Image: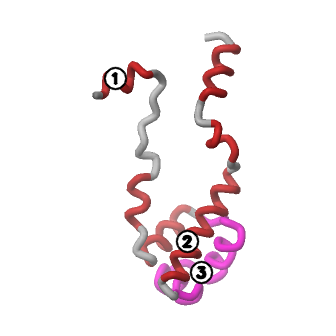
Amino acid sequence: MTKQIKLVNILSMNNFEFLKSPNDINIEIAKKVSARRREKNITQEKLSVNSDVSFGSIKRFERTGEISLSSLIKIAFALGLENDFDLLFSKKGYSSIQEVIDEQ
């Protein structure tokens, strides 16, 4: 495959995926978690106790989006959001229309 064809393939992909940085996604996840926490009327302190994640880590996560995967999963469990991880990376990527047709 030539460089030109590879570039066309990259550019023809869903361009919206390329508009976000990893940090942007971290911040979005932190905002969503914070919103769910507030909907449930749970303080950061209470979430810390319920999740066994340090209060400082929770504060930092909600402010910066930085947290370990293990701590994020503990927080999700404490908020009753553990099923949200089921869909993570579950979408199959297709490299051609033929793959889509063959799957059906």
Total marks shown come to 3
Instruction: Give the numbered dot on residue 33.
Output: 2
Q: Quadrant of residue 61?
A: bottom right
Residue lying at 42% horizontally and 69% vertically, measured from the top left: 81
Label 3 Cα neighbours within 10 Å, binned few <14 / some 14-19 / many ≥20: some
Instruction: Give the mark nearest the N terminus, 1 or 3.
Output: 3
Instruction: Give the mark nearest the N terminus, 1 or 2.
Output: 2
Amino acid type, callout 2: Val
Assess whether mark 3 and mark 2 are in contact (beta carbons under 8 angstroms): no
What's the distance in space between the residues labelled 1 and 2, CA to CA? Answer: 38 Å
Question: Would you name the residue on which mark 1 appears?
Answer: 101
Question: Would you name the residue on which mark 3 appears?
Answer: 54
Question: Does residue 17 appear left or right of residue 78 in this picture?
Answer: right
Q: Is mark 3 on a helix, strand or loop?
A: loop
**Disc 1 vs disc 3: which is toward the camera?**
1
Q: What element carries label 2?
A: helix
Instruction: Tell me if residue 56 is in the magenta stretch.
Output: yes
Amino acid type, callout 1: Ile
Assess whether mark 3 and mark 1 are in contact (beta carbons under 8 angstroms): no
Instruction: Give the mark nearest the N terminus, 2 or 3.
Output: 2
Picture coordinates of residue 30, whole percent (x, y) = 61, 68
Q: Is mark 1 on a helix, strand or loop?
A: helix
Picture coordinates of residue 54, whole percent (x, y) = 59, 80
Amino acid type, callout 3: Ser
Magenta range: 42-67
**Disc 1 vs disc 2: which is toward the camera?**
1
Question: Does residue 98 appear left or right of residue 68 in this picture?
Answer: left
Question: Does residue 28 appear left or right of residue 77 in this picture?
Answer: right
Residue lying at 54% horizontally and 61% vertically, measured from the top left: 69
Residue lying at 61% horizontally and 77% vertically, measured from the top left: 58
Residue lying at 61% horizontally and 27% vertically, measured from the top left: 12
